[in-house]
Image (tube, rainbow, N blue to C red):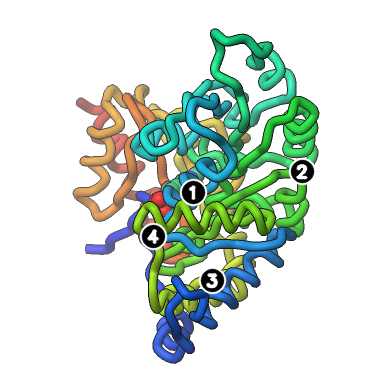
Amino acid sequence: MRIVDFRSDTVTLPTDEMLDAMRTAPLGDDVYHEDPTVNHLEELAAKKMGKEAALLTTSGTQANLVSVLSQTKRGDEVILESEAHMYYYESGAFSVFGGLIPRLVKGQFGVLTPQDIESNLRPPNIHFPPTSLVCIENTHNRAGGTIWTPSETRAVCDLAHGRGLKVHMDGARIFNAAVAQNLDVRELTKHVDSMMFCVSKGLSAPVGSLAVGDREFVDKARRYRKMLGGGMRQAGVIAAAGIVAIEKMVERLKDDHSNAQTLAKGLASIEGITIDRAHVQTNIVVYDVSGLGTSGEGWIAKLSKSGVKAGALENTRVRMVTHRGIDREDIVYALDVAEKAAAEMRRK
Ligand SMILES: Cc1ncc(COP(=O)(O)O)c(C=O)c1O
């Protein structure tokens, strides 16, 4: 049976070029800063993002955590979009390890405005935890891979900076945002104080994310990474694949975006499925199956019988992510499976 795995772009496997690079990478002990391949990746990541320095971490979650710890102090309040990955899916890490209080602000498809931030800022007062950081997410996962534009990013950063707040960007899929807008990624990173991105998602590296910012930030983040047990030794094995990911795998993300459009169009034509196509902007397709009289889990179970794997969000919302392991024919196959599954469900 054909298997088409839309659960996430994290299921991508390393390319042959990555595996070759991993086998031949010059290595050293990275805790002593002596792994030339890690050093190379960190320099490359910093340069790509237009910042001073970068730090290789084990995962996006760890990169977000060390970033937020480095930008705050215990007891601070952090403003996040209400559906932020950092709030929703990272086990409350920043509250547990940083003693930080989340203040959730509802955005429009994941995007916040300066007014959203402004209206949630409170004056200095002993009753309130001091707010020190705003976190934004580009692309926004739970909103369906939606993008922030450079001007939206700048507007929020200007407001935050004017109020003495730092801005951290969860840019797990920042290259998707850049490719979708045909922009140099630096247009999206230049106003934020720190950011992280993953090489382990659509870029296909097996492991790794980078926390990026100025030298002082990265020095702090390195210390927090050590505390969290993330000081790796011959991590060049991992970094070698990350270098290939950044240098070779960015441009092809547009194929994933075009496959997502085809998928969204096909799903929109199925009676019982509701999808907001205007907000399918990168490689994530979110839709609702309530019109089929089933839950997201019920729909997913049905598709998986024919080898099409999708992910449930909540209730009747379903998420499908395109990536390097999915081609045009897979999309055609998945749409055929979905049409047949929907027809069966409607008959019941
Ligand atoms: C927006 C966003 N941020 C952070 C992460 C966390 O990355 P990781 O799974 O590598 O911890 C993810 C993972 O899917 C994500 O989608």
Circles 2, 4 touching at the beta carbon (< 8 Å): no
Q: Residue type at mark 2: give it.
A: Pro
Disc 1 target residue: 66
Disc 4 target residue: 230
Using the image, determine if residue 239 lies above or below residue 5. Answer: below
Using the image, determine if residue 39 lies above or below residue 82. Answer: below
User: From the Cβ of disc 3, is ligand 1 less than 8 Å away?
Assistant: no
Sequence-wise, the earlier of marks 1 and 4 is 1
Q: Name the front one of labels 3 and 1.
A: 1
Disc 2 target residue: 150
Residue 287 visible? The answer is no
Number of marks present in the image shown: 4
Query: Which quarter of the picture shows residue 215?
Result: bottom right
Sequence-wise, the earlier of marks 3 and 4 is 4
Q: Residues within 10 Å of mark 2 (few under 14, many from 20)?
A: some
Q: Position of residue 54 (x, y in %)?
A: 60, 62
The circle drawn on residue 290 is none
Q: Residue type at mark 3: give it.
A: Ala
Q: Residue type at mark 4: give it.
A: Gly
Q: Residue type at mark 1: give it.
A: Val
Measure the alpha-carbon separation of dots 1 and 4. 10 Å
Measure the alpha-carbon separation of dots 2 and 3. 24 Å
Residue 39 visible? The answer is yes
Q: Residues within 10 Å of mark 1 (few under 14, many from 20)?
A: many
Disc 3 target residue: 245
Secondary structure, mark 4, is: loop
User: From the Cβ of disc 2, is ligand 1 less than 8 Å away?
Assistant: no
User: From the Cβ of disc 4, is ligand 1 less than 8 Å away?
Assistant: no
Q: Residues within 10 Å of mark 3 (few under 14, many from 20)?
A: many
